[in-house]
């Protein structure tokens, strides 16, 4: 049984110098933190709802990795911003319009197939992205990426093996996975979208080129799908807007729940 | 030359010598059944116990608390796994045990039939419920059945972190605003008595106690363990500045222990019999998750079959 302790919080993060393009970097760091937090929150919803106990623990591990990553990134974003905001200010004191996560992270957990297909689509991107980010000229971000990469590799091995089990398991698992793929496909394009801000950071060697990751991602995707006897929809459109704070209604509901206690009793320490 | 000893005599001799009984050893049928009942009940408690706190992971008021709580609840799932495995060494299966739980034949700790209504309750559960569980489980490290004893050793290592996280939540509330202090007191008011009930009926009334003690499955009596819990918890409440909801609670110099009031045994019986505030909800939740997961388990088996 694999069980890991929660990753150390941002207390463990070393202070790094703040680079010239600090405000761009702060935005990117917050985006990545939001991705991790919102996905981690969705995964944590599985607690006591998983199909069996071993999977219960594995989902919790993945959620813990996401939360740990979010905490490191928020701490770094707060430092870059220099206004004294801590991780909880980012997580609990912002509304949906201020969150910049990818939409794919906020979609409700759905059934087990939906959660694991989402995880596979994200993990297979995440591994590529983190590998590139680990070479960032920003040491702090590179360090967080290198650590997260080890975890993401493991997440991907797991979610990929579930793709095979779904696809080659039973008729029902195949059908459910196929439905999840069709529902999620339109949200995958956003992972590869560059905007001017990330383009500037790319020029400075800080941010990876998301667009360049699409081909390697597609290769892995089609290999896995064909091994699993699953298919990608012929045409699937592209739904995005998370980076600009344009979210599905699901994020609002997620935040209503996540922030329930702190909104009811604001300004307190917990 | 003395005649060969019977199985029963060898077994009794090993129990008397405080030796561990292992899965391959001969054991009386009653011993085996008693253990399956107790270990599976313990496993179910770990798993059902994930629900009340688990429902607060998504609402935990800071990222640190969220992380720690998720890790804690994950631990409980791990405890469930160790214990199901320990019970399986006695010739039952996880599926059988789950059926017994869902049909009401097997019990789990009644404490989890109380609702977890506030963030203060999350603190109180870690502090009191895990605190009581530790007292019980430390004692069970000396239980006579090897796999159960070893599971307890592993589990106890993790439990102290559970209690600390709960106590830390309480401490934070008690050093906070008036509202937060009230939240902590309210949680203690509701969880104190159910926590004392966790140790079960008085020794004289305990259905399984005397046989379990004779077999050294249980090493200390319900009342002894309850006293130990009260003695260690009262100073902790004092440190928090909270009031324990028992007018009879008082230090007894002569005994060197705290005296405390009588448990409401009618409430205890009601909750054990299935009539607590959340009995139906807890089992329904377990059944729903298990049924929702049926297709996943089938798919996994089919896949393994194919790739054997
Ligand atoms: Fe436990
Ligand atoms: Fe515990």
Image (cartoon, rainbow, N blue to C red):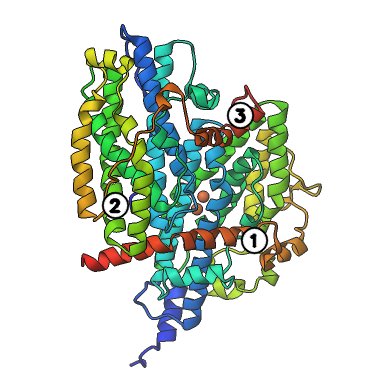
Q: Position of residue B134 (x, y in %)?
A: 54, 52
On the image, numbered disc 1 is attached to which residue? B279
Q: Residues within 10 Å of mark 2 (few under 14, many from 20)?
A: many
State which chain disc 1 sits on.
B
Tell me residue A103's x, y (percent): 41, 33
Reading the image, the residue beneath label 3 is A262
Whether residue B93 is situated above or below residue B188 in the rendered picture:
below
Which residue is the site of mark 2?
A163
Q: Secondary structure at mark 1?
A: helix
Q: Position of residue A7 (x, y in %)?
A: 38, 35
Please say if B33 is above or below A54: below
Identify which residue is drawn at 53% across, 36% down: A254
Residue B9 x %, y %: 43, 84
Is the residue under label 1 in contact with that under label 2 (CB below 8 Å)?
no
Per the image, label 2 sits on a secondary structure element best described as: helix
Q: For disc 3, does the CB lie below 8 Å from ligand 2?
A: no
Determine the residue positioned at 69% across, 62% down. Answer: B271
- Name the residue: 53% across, 30% down: B62
Give me the C-alpha separation between circle 2 and circle 1: 36 Å
Among numbered discs 3 and 2, the one appearing first in the sequence? 2
Q: Residues within 10 Å of mark 1 (few under 14, many from 20)?
A: some
Rendered residue at 64%/39% (across/down):
B120
Toward the viewer: B295 or B200?
B295
Residue B45 in view (yes/no): no
Examine the rendered structure and indicate whether residue B16 appears above or below residue B133.
below
Q: Are marks 3 and 1 in contact (CB under 8 Å)?
A: no
Quadrant for the N terminus of chain A, please.
bottom left
Q: Is residue B157 above or below residue B1?
A: above
């Amino acid at each position: 049984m694999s069980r890991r302790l929660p990753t150390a919080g941002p207390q463990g993060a070393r202070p790094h110098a703040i680079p010239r393009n600090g405000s761009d970097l702060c935005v990117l760091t917050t985006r990545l933190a939001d991705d991790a937090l919102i996905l981690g929150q969705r995964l944590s919803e599985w607690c006591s709802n998983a199909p069996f106990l071993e999977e219960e623990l594995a989902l919790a591990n993945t959620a813990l990795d996401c939360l740990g990553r979010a905490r490191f990134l928020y701490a770094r974003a707060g430092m870059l911003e220099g206004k004294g905001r801590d991780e909880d200010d980012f997580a609990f004191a912002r509304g949906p319009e201020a969150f910049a996560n990818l939409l794919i992270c906020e979609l409700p957990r759905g059934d087990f197939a939906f959660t694991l297909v989402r995880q596979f689509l994200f993990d297979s991107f995440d591994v590529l992205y983190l590998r590139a980010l680990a070479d960032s000229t920003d040491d702090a971000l590179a360090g967080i990426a290198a650590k997260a990469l080890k975890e993401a590799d493991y997440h991907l091995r797991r979610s990929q093996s579930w793709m095979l089990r779904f696809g080659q398991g039973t008729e029902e698992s195949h059908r459910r996975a196929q439905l999840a793929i069709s529902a999620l496909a339109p949200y995958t394009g956003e992972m590869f979208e560059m905007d001017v801000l990330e383009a500037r950071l790319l020029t400075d060697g800080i941010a990876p080129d998301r667009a360049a990751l699409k081909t390697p991602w597609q290769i892995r995707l089609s290999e896995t799908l064909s091994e699993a006897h699953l298919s990608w929809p012929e045409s699937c459109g592209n739904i995005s807007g998370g980076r600009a704070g344009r979210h599905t209604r699901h994020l609002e509901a997620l935040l209503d729940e996540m922030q329930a206690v702190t909104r009811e009793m604001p300004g307190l320490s917990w | 030359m003395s005649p060969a000893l019977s199985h029963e005599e060898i077994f009794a001799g090993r129990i008397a010598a405080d030796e561990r009984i292992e899965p391959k050893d001969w054991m009386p049928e009653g011993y085996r059944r008693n253990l399956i009942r107790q270990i599976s009940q313990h496993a179910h408690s770990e798993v059902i116990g994930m629900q009340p706190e688990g429902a607060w992971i998504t609402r935990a008021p800071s990222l640190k608390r969220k992380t720690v709580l998720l890790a804690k609840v994950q631990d409980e799932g791990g405890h469930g796994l160790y214990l199901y495995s320990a019970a399986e060494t006695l010739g039952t299966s996880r599926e059988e045990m789950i059926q017994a739980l869902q049909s009401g034949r097997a019990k789990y700790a009644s404490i989890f039939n109380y609702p977890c209504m506030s963030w203060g309750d999350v603190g109180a559960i870690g502090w009191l419920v895990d605190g009581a569980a530790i007292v019980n489980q430390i004692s069970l490290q000396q239980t006579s059945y090897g796999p159960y004893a070893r599971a307890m050793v592993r589990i106890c290592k993790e439990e102290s972190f559970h209690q600390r996280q709960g106590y830390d939540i309480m401490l934070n509330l008690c050093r906070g605003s008036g509202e937060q202090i009230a939240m902590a007191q309210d949680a203690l008011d509701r969880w104190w008595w159910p926590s004392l009930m966790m140790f079960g009926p008085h020794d004289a009334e305990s259905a399984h106690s005397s046989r379990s003690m004779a077999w050294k499955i249980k090493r200390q009596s319900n009342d002894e363990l309850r006293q130990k819990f009260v003695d260690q918890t009262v100073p902790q409440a004092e440190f928090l500045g909270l009031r324990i909801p028992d007018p009879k609670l008082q230090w007894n110099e002569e005994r060197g222990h705290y005296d405390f009031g009588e448990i409401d045994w009618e409430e205890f019986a009601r909750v054990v019999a299935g009539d607590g505030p959340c009995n139906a909800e807890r089992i329904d939740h377990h059944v729903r998750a298990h049924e929702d997961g049926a297709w996943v388990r089938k798919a996994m088996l089919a896949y393994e079959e194919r790739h054997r």
